[in-house]
Amino acid sequence: MNFLNKDIFKIRSVSIEGAENQLYIKLKKMEKDLFDKNINFIDFIKLEKTILKDKRIEKININTKELGILSLEVKEKEINYYLQYKKEIYLLDKNGEICGRINDKRVLDVPIICVDSKEEILPLIILMKKIEKTQLQKMLSQIYMDGKYCINMILLDGTIIKTNLEVDPKKYYISECLYLNLSKWRKIEYIDIRFKDYVLKYMEDKNGK
């Protein structure tokens, strides 16, 4: 016991790897509570459970690679979407779970899901999963509900793909081909794929043509 209580086992600093921005700041604040505590008498299981309560974290590895240094190796959840809701922008994982705010991470190249209510999040996530293997997902800027029976997918150039959850997934590939070929010659305002036939409207020029 005398050996285990020696000062060499006291924590002098906390090393944090894998955490960005606000999460890093939050974990760094723990250093004050852990400083000067004996590493041999810390409940690592309890500490891990406490850290994992933060929804931004997928996994945490706590160890002591060097005497006096407690190492926290963090794996943050992968962010698949931004969520715009009530003038705030949040981070969403692939399942639509909120895991932080926009300033918690560096700027990401991911689509924006715009909602007026939390109930709109799930259907939009379901639709995103339907197109995840298409080029449309890479070209997508934002997505939102446009009434009860329409979901608007806004591409990077402003073109709108009008769809809903009942649309056959195969139609996304066809609409992708339509867009890539026709947009070379003229700006498209929207492609509506909700019906049997594809409804396409070109953007009018300043002369109304």
Image (spheres, grey):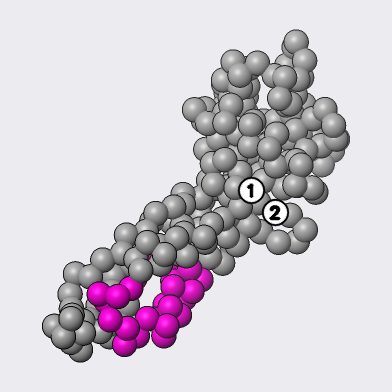
- The answer to which of 187 and 156 lies nearer the viewer is 156
Q: Position of residue 191 (x, y in %)?
A: 72, 26
Q: Are marks 2 and 1 in contact (CB under 8 Å)?
A: yes
Is residue 190 shown to the viewer in this render? no
Crowd band around label 2 with a 10 angstrom C-alpha radius: few (<14), some (14–19), many (20+): some
Label located before the other in sequence (2 or 1): 2
Q: Is residue 126 above or below residue 32?
A: above
Q: Quadrant of the C terminus?
A: top right
Residue 84: give its label: 2
Query: Splitting the image into 4 quarters, where does residue 187 fall?
Result: top right
What residue occupies the far left of the structure in this picture?
3
- The answer to which of 177 and 83 lies nearer the viewer is 83
Q: Position of residue 91 (x, y in %)?
A: 58, 54
- The answer to which of 180 and 93 lies nearer the viewer is 93
Q: Is residue 97 above or below residue 190?
A: below
Is residue 180 shown to the viewer in this render? yes
What secondary structure is marked by label 1? strand
- Name which residue lies at 80% across and 49% down: 116
- Amino acid type for the residue under numbered disc 2: Gln
Residue 96 magenta-highlighted: no
- The answer to which of 48 and 177 lies nearer the viewer is 48
Residue 35 magenta-highlighted: yes
What residue occupies the far front of the structure in this picture?
1
Q: Which residues are magenta?
A: 15-42
